[in-house]
Amino acid sequence: MSSVKYVTEKDFQAEVLGANTPVLVDFTADWCQPCRMIAPIVEQLAGQWDGKVKVVKLDADQNPNIMMQYGVMGIPTLMLFKSGQIKERITGYLPKDKIEAKVAPHM
């Protein structure tokens, strides 16, 4: 069972855009094989960055308005938000070290 919390269109503003720390959002879906491949990495990063970066997931199928708002055309997509602004966007599978390298400058 995932320890990373899911956000929805209802709480995206408060949980992501209004957060005091950077937030990594994993745009995902149950049927997506690459999403399943990246999920353990996202879990590891959530534990590793506890207190520094908030890590959440967003179900692509259940939140189409957020998907359109941020132009997410493919999943998995990871987006790092800081002070309500997108700082990084990663589409597709990347190994853990590559994700860390992209996020580290914003921590």
Image: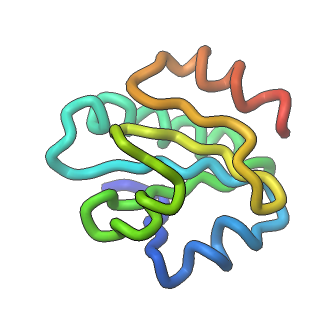
Q: Position of residue 11 (x, y in %)?
A: 55, 80
- Give the number of callouts: 0
Residue furthest out toward the bottom? 10
Position of residue 82 in the picture relative to residue 61 (left or right):
right
Residue 12 sits in which quadrant?
A: bottom right
Q: Position of residue 17 (x, y in %)?
A: 71, 67
Residue furthest out toward the left? 31
Specify how the rendered protein is coloured: rainbow
Residue depicted at 42% across the width and 58% down the height: 67
Q: In the depicted view, which residue is nearer to us: 68 or 56?
A: 68
Position of residue 20 in the picture relative to residue 38 (left or right):
right
Residue depicted at 47% across the width and 49% down the height: 71
Residue 58, placed above or below residue 75: below
Q: Position of residue 43 (x, y in %)?
A: 48, 42
Residue 62, placed above or below residue 98: below
Residue 107, placed above or below residue 52: above
Residue depicted at 34% across the width and 66% down the height: 64
Residue 10, placed above or below residue 100: below
Residue 75 sits in which quadrant?
A: top left
